Amino acid sequence: MDGPLGPRESAEFVAGKSRDVSIDGGGVRSVAELLLAKASGPELSPGAWKALHELNPRAADEAAVSWVFVTDTLNFSFWSEHDEHKCLVGYKGRTYSGYWSLCAAVNRALDEGIPITSASYYATATLDQVKHIFRSDTDVPMPLIEERHRILNETGKILLEKFQGSFLNCVRKSEKSAQKLMHLVVESFPSYRDVTQFEGKRISFYKRAQILVADTWSVLEGKGDGCFTDISSITMFADYRLPQVLAHLGALKYSKELLEKLLRGEMFSYGDRQEVEIRGCSLWCVELIRDCLLELIEEKGEKNSREINSILLDYYLWDYARDHREDMKGIPFHRTRCIYY
Ligand SMILES: Nc1nc2c(c(CN[C@H]3C=C[C@H](O)[C@@H]3O)cn2[C@@H]2O[C@H](COP(=O)(O)O)[C@@H](O)[C@H]2O)c(=O)[nH]1
């Protein structure tokens, strides 16, 4: 049986048949114009990954790649029932929530001498050890901690069996192709298989596999093993934050019925029609924003415009969502509990 449609094709297919989510052309243009002002700035550059985020590794070595692999293996489902009551991790004088609480916990463990980035450790770590590593400073634990434990054991065992315990070996097998690495990750590690059905077709968003390729590219600073020739083929990462910020910026519109469900905080199951429409239309929306931005840069005749790809747009919009949490309070995000995003 042939594989599912790739993320970009899946998104275009979903957007073409979507009923409750639509892409607003005017909103796409206004987001492209917002990004145009940043196009030659520091935020929309590969260096921002390290420069703007103190928890990310400074180095570009094997240990840094192992850090990326373990964090992206666990990079899912941080939202809490009540935003004022959530998992928090204090690290080096700062308190972190959401995705950053994961990174803070990983760095705290390493400082405590726990080799959490080593496959030989996490392949056999116990549930209690994992609960200790990802412990919260509040009485709200990190969501899906049992699943995280299971995935760590599963992924660590496979990394030891197939890649001598080093994700850098997996990267090197991709021969500097982002697409090859994405597919090698999905084929090798079951928890990365972000695949579902829509209108009778098998589709994929591969959110964690794509962000893993992107973060590997970022941590290696686009050089050496991280010099992927086709990095621009990677799309945005279909999580639960990007739809929220795209709706906030007017590029994504929800039907009245869907908006009411979202505002009621109703749960969606992974693979529900409306959940797929939200993720697929968000992904396609960022592709259209990128196309529009490249046209605006062309029109402006900017010579020194560096490579703008969907990864950098995604990182920027994700950070924007973080920085505008208050303004976005009225725009709900969709609540799905799953290991894929
Ligand atoms: N589309 C997209 N989704 C991303 C990321 C990141 C962090 N990655 C990069 C960002 C900075 C670092 O440099 C990393 O490279 C996490 N997420 C997702 O968001 C959700 C968590 O959100 P909150 O509950 O607010 O922490 C969850 O689904 C998580 O999987 C990204 O960049 N893009």
Image: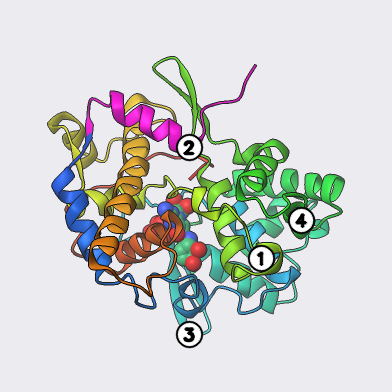
**Residue 109 horizontal side relative to residue 303, left or right:** right
Considering the numbered disc 3 on the image, is that residue within a helix, a strand or a loop?
Answer: loop
Magenta segment: 1-21
In this orientation, does residue 143 appear? no
In primary-sequence order, the first of circles 4 and 2 is 2
- Camera-side residue of 172 and 92: 172
Q: Which residue is rendered at x = 49% and y = 39% of the image?
A: 338
When the figure is inspected, residue 109 is found, relative to residue 130, above or below; the finding is below
Residue 7 circle label: 2
User: Badge 2: how crowded within 10 Å, few (<14), some, or many (20+)?
Assistant: many
In primary-sequence order, the first of circles 3 and 1 is 1
Viewer-nearest of discs 2 and 3: 2
Question: What kind of residue is marked 4?
Answer: Arg
Q: Position of residue 86 (x, y in %)?
A: 39, 59
Viewer-nearest of discs 3 and 4: 4
Considering the numbered disc 4 on the image, is that residue within a helix, a strand or a loop?
Answer: helix
Please name the residue that numbered disc 1 is placed on.
67
When the figure is inspected, residue 158 is found, relative to residue 308, above or below; the finding is above
Considering the numbered disc 2 on the image, is that residue within a helix, a strand or a loop?
Answer: helix
Residue 93 circle label: 3
Q: Is mark 3 within 8 Å of ligand 1?
A: no
In this orientation, does residue 244 appear? yes
Viewer-nearest of discs 2 and 1: 2
| Alpha carbon distance from label 4 to label 2 | 23 Å
In primary-sequence order, the first of circles 2 and 3 is 2
Quadrant including the N terminus: top right
**Residue 158 horizontal side relative to residue 87, left or right:** right
| Alpha carbon distance from label 2 to label 3 | 39 Å
